[in-house]
Image: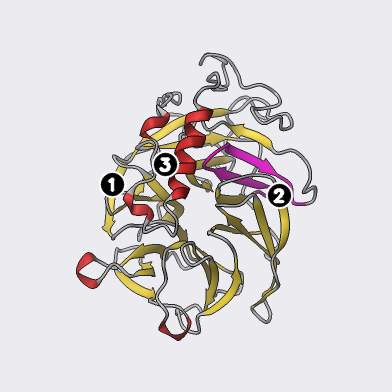
Amino acid sequence: MRCGRTSRDAPAGRSRRPIPFASATTATRPTSRGNLADVNRVAVVVCLLALGSCGPPSVATDAGTDGGAASDAGDDGGSDAGPRTLEVFADVGSRSEGIAIGRTPGGASVLYVGTSDDRIVRVAPDGVVGDFVSIHAPVGLTTRADGTLLVCAKQPVAMGEAAAIFAVTPDGTITTLVAAGPGATPFVLTNYVLEAPDGSIVFTDSGGDSVFRADADGSHVALVAAVSYANGLAFSPSGDTLYVASWDTTTLHALSFDATTGAYGAPTVAHDGIMNVDGIVTTSTGSLVLVTSAAGILEVDPATPTAMPRTLATNREVTLPANGVFGDSAFGTANVYLSTLGRTTISVLHTDRMAP
């Protein structure tokens, strides 16, 4: 566990602010979330946030100057979280959900963030925010090996607001990559997308309780699995396992993946007992950082599915976190950057873990 920064951390030339506490009453999911299949899911989140806000605040810092360090066990009785630092990294001016590391046309590292006011912004390693493109209701983001940004979003209002997967080049050119499901069936709410190890893509339709795959060019869309309110996705470091979050259940699913054939196996239980997992971040050790709506940021090891999760940050510290991503060498490869539906800021969590 690191208490201080190393050369892997983001540049230390900026003065960053410790995370402020936010009222749970303001942490409702924005309209950019899309037409949820069940509006009761929103009520569940608000209730959980209200309950969570009753606990004592605890922000752990390197110097321990922010009102007391988090307990070793964490709020949920998890294993030793150890010292870590959670800071505000940038203010994007609106609530956010999708977040991904990418590069500009000139090759500079940037952090892409999708906001609730129909923007995707680019954030530099020093925290400077600049507008990139306008796209309607962006949700999950990922960057392909060629630098193209994939975006779960909706067509413009004038085009009926159909959910889709879009491709955005580093120079800002937007095209629709996947417009509909098998048989031209409309998606309900495309929520998260990844590039698979074989170059194909896999994505969730939360409103349709489904996981889909498509070829690299967006063709041959096929159902991979039925998962209740399928949300965040992550591949294992070896690329042979796909993890799928089920936001309205306590189950984290695992599907085998064969990069030679492109075939996925049936869902199995990777971990159970954690509600409202929104995003998943894989570490180099194979453990998973879970971004949850109800319990903050947790770490679990699929190798020990019954073990208690390790608390990295409580929901009181990061109100309604949505997704996370490890930084690259410019942003710090031990740093997890977090979007949030409860604030306008992007947080950075300095960890003792590394990106795969």
Give the residues in magenta. Answer: 283-302
Residue 326 in the image, given as x and y percentages of width and height: 55, 47
* Residue nearer the viewer, 50 or 244: 50
Q: Residues within 10 Å of mark 3 (few under 14, many from 20)?
A: many
Q: Which amino acid lies under the numbered mark 3 shown in the image of this protein?
A: Pro
Residue that numbered label 1 is attached to: 130
**From this viewpoint, which residue is outermost toward the left?**
158
Element type at marker 2? strand
- Answer left or right for 151 relative to 69: left
Give above or below for 254 relative to 306.
below
Residue 19 in the image, given as x and y percentages of width and height: 45, 26
**Which circle's residue, 1 or 3, is located before the other in the chain?**
3
Q: Label 1 vs label 3: CA separation? A: 12 Å
Element type at marker 3? loop
Q: Which amino acid lies under the numbered mark 1 shown in the image of this protein?
A: Gly
Residue that numbered label 2 is attached to: 272
Residue that numbered label 3 is attached to: 125
Labels in figure, total: 3
At horizontal 71% and vertical 67% (from top left) the residue drawn is 240
At horizontal 46% and vertical 52% (from top left) the residue drawn is 101
* Residue nearer the viewer, 257 or 53: 53
Residue 288 on the magenta span: yes
Element type at marker 1? strand
- Answer left or right for 295 relative to 346: right
At horizontal 67% and vertical 82% (from top left) the residue drawn is 261
